Image: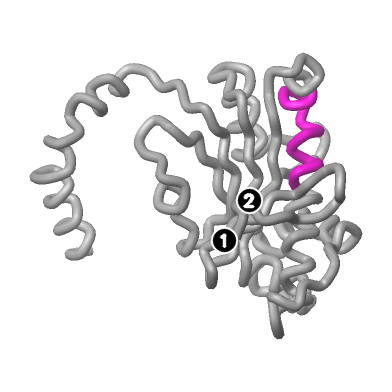
Amino acid sequence: MERLIEGHKRFRKELFPERRHQFHLLAESQAPEWLFITCSDSRIVPDLILGTGPGDLFISRNAGNVVPITANDVDGTTATIEYAVEVLKVPYAILCGHSDCGAMKAALDRKNLEHLPKASRWLRHVEAAFSHRQPLNAEDGEHAELASLIRGNVVAQWLNLKAQPAVSHALAHGTISVYAWYYDILTGRIEQYDEHFRRFLPLLDR
Ligand SMILES: [Zn+2]
């Protein structure tokens, strides 16, 4: 815990005073532009890879960047999506998966998760990834099969996101754009799913 206490001390002493004005503006309201749904994985630091900061991203994270579609049920992710779209009226929503995802490794290896009753139930939500697998990419090397499944999961969860009642309503009214991303931890690159070409393309020109 010592590391966190020290980090917070530094924040209070150095960073907060520098950005006091920004924090004061944000103290009583927020108007984020982006709903960002990603995995809980500690290696994804959205503000770091996107150059964003306080007040920018409305974030929902869970193991496997899942958007559950179970009817007549509620969970943290879908409630967060509803709030972001209906109340905050975010103009953009991004579903972001990542390389080396533990949740997807477990799905691919068909690991026995009997000792993890909650996780094994949760990971049923990623089964749809298998029917959306993406072509193998030589750049992924020995992890190509896993990466193809992870990209498939991004597509599956992106479709689930677009099917959420609040999102599909906003899409019909042209008030939201919904993107699907794959973030590669090793290279720091982001790929975006191109609906027209039905494949992932680099977000930036190389
Ligand atoms: Zn993950």
The answer to whether mark 1 and mark 2 are in CB contact below 8 A is yes
Q: Does 196 sit above or below residue 146?
A: above
Secondary structure beneath dot 2 equals loop
Evaluate whether residue 53 shows in this view: yes
> Which quadrant is home to the C terminus?
bottom right
The residue under label 1 is which amino acid type?
Arg
The answer to which quarter of the image holds residue 171 is top right
Left or right for 78, reference 72: left
Residue drawn at (20%, 33%) of the image: 19
Residue 147's x, y, as percent?
Answer: 72, 70
Residue drawn at (23%, 22%) of the image: 24
> Which quadrant is home to the N terminus?
bottom left
Circle 1 is placed at which residue position? Answer: 189
Circle 2 is placed at which residue position? Answer: 203
Q: What crowding class fits label 2: few (fewer than 14 Cα within 10 Å), some (14-19), or many (20 or more)?
A: some
Q: Is residue 160 magenta?
A: yes
* Outermost right residue: 131
Left or right for 54, reference 165: left
Q: Does 56 sit above or below residue 197?
A: above
Residue drawn at (69%, 50%) of the image: 192
Q: Which residues fall within the magenta stretch?
A: 157-168
